[in-house]
């Protein structure tokens, strides 16, 4: 029987939930445990960051052309190391590497590809601000040996099997979903015993939000739809909670986590400089969209559901609007009006 008792250890929770599915092989459970371990190791590295000379830029530039922080590289290595055993994951697509990391030792039995942003919001590191990690698990069609990156992208399942994130704030939290039957579960790391404990069972996004999160410094770079949407969020309408307040931390994970728990909307529209948007579909937008949808929210590119955006490339970008269903449907009507 599944249990949702506050304080349940992650491993026990995963094992008991798996027991509900008669055909379950235990592989996804083992993979979630590997992800949990990666989160604990990154949390530890972050807690010691200021003391161990691992803050700051590494001198490298990642595939996005962004300055890589030393901790970006450390978090990336921690994820790769977590999947290196267990015959589960033959390839990992990460923000930090242009090509997927292939793990040939797992290619015979491995059924899953993991997409990961190892350290999201890493420009906050130098100021001891919030950061996170985002992951998405997809099944592979037809075995884990890939002939090319295009072959990998063509063979990953359109639907995610599991998705979630870690948020490294005053506490470290893991939030994940395995889809409709599982809901969205939140665990908090107890550093004293080194275990994630169930703290937020069956998370649902509040229907009515109070805040929006966006880099409004770009407002003149946005198209008319998001510009009108932000004016609408700022206009007075007491019954529907407007005007909304603003909260923006510069770390997608922290901002979306707030929206999940408190309601509201996060958005990063296309800009003149980034006409396809800035955020990455496979390891930022899609996993957060799965979590928010499973919690009763919504996620859109402005014109379509994020989970329906066709997968073309490992590092493809998308505009992202994510939050409560009321806010997302309002945004979509502003975008439609802009193009009418
Ligand atoms: P990385 O730190 O992983 O590169 O991601 C930062 C980020 O993609 C996301 O976490 C923020 O919401 C967004 O960029 C912030 O971008 P701006 O600095 O343009 O607001």
Image (cartoon, rainbow, N blue to C red):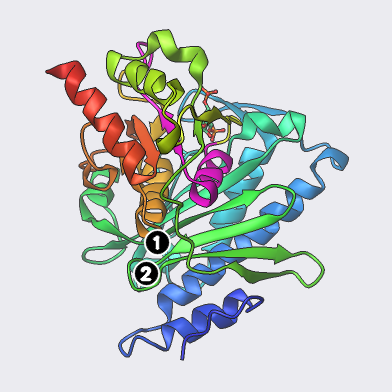
Q: Residue at x 38, y 45 (%)?
A: 324
Q: Which residue is mark 1?
A: 90
Identify which residue, 16 or 292, lies in the foreground.
292
Magenta residue span: 252-274
Is the Cβ of the residue at disc 2 closer than 8 Å to that at disc 1?
A: yes
State whether residue 302 appears in this view: no
The reply, left or right, for residue 136 in relation to residue 337 is right
Residue at 65 percent across and 71 percent down: it is: 197
Identify whether 135 is placed above or below 201. Answer: above
Quarter-of-image position of residue 128: top right
Q: Along the line of sight, which residue is nearer the eye, 101 or 191?
A: 191
Q: Quadrant of residue 177?
A: bottom left
- Give the quadrant of the C terminus: top left
Q: Is residue 105 visible?
A: yes
* Residue under numbered circle 2: 110
Nearer the observer, 241 or 49: 241
| Residue positioned 36% across, 34% down in the render | 320
């Amino acid at each position: 029987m599944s249990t949702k008792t506050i304080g349940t250890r992650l491993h026990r929770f995963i094992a008991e939930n798996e027991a509900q599915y008669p055909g379950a092989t235990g592989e996804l459970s083992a993979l979630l445990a590997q992800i949990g371990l990666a989160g604990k190791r990154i949390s530890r590295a972050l807690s010691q960051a200021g003391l161990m000379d691992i803050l700051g830029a590494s001198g490298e530039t990642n595939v996005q052309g962004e300055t890589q922080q030393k901790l970006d590289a450390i978090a990336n290595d921690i994820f790769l190391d977590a999947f290196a055993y267990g015959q589960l994951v033959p390839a990992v697509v990460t923000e930090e590497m242009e090509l997927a990391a292939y793990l040939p030792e797992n290619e015979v039995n491995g059924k899953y590809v993991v997409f990961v942003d190892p350290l999201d919001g890493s420009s906050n590191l130098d100021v001891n601000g919030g950061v996170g990690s985002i992951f998405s698990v997809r099944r592979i069609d037809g075995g884990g040996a890939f002939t090319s990156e295009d072959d990998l992208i063509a063979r990953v399942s359109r639907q995610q099997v599991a998705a979630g994130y870690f948020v490294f704030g005053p506490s470290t939290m893991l939030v994940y979903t395995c889809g409709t039957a599982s809901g969205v579960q939140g665990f908090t790391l107890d550093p004293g015993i080194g275990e994630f404990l169930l703290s937020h069972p069956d998370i649902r996004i509040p229907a009515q939000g109070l805040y929006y999160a966006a880099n409004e410094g770009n407002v003149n770079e946005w198209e008319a739809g998001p510009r009108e949407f932000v004016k609408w969020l700022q206009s007075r309408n007491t019954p529907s909670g407007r005007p909304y307040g603003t909260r923006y931390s510069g770390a997608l994970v922290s901002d979306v986590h707030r929206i999940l728990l408190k309601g509201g909307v996060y958005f990063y529209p296309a800009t003149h400089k980034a006409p396809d948007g800035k955020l990455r579909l496979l390891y930022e937008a899609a996993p957060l969209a799965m979590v928010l949808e499973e919690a009763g929210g919504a996620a859109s590119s402005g014109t379509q559901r994020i989970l329906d955006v066709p997968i073309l490339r490992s590092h493809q970008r998308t505009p992202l609007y994510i939050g409560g269903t009321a806010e997302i449907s309002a945004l979509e009507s502003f975008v439609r009006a802009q193009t009418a």
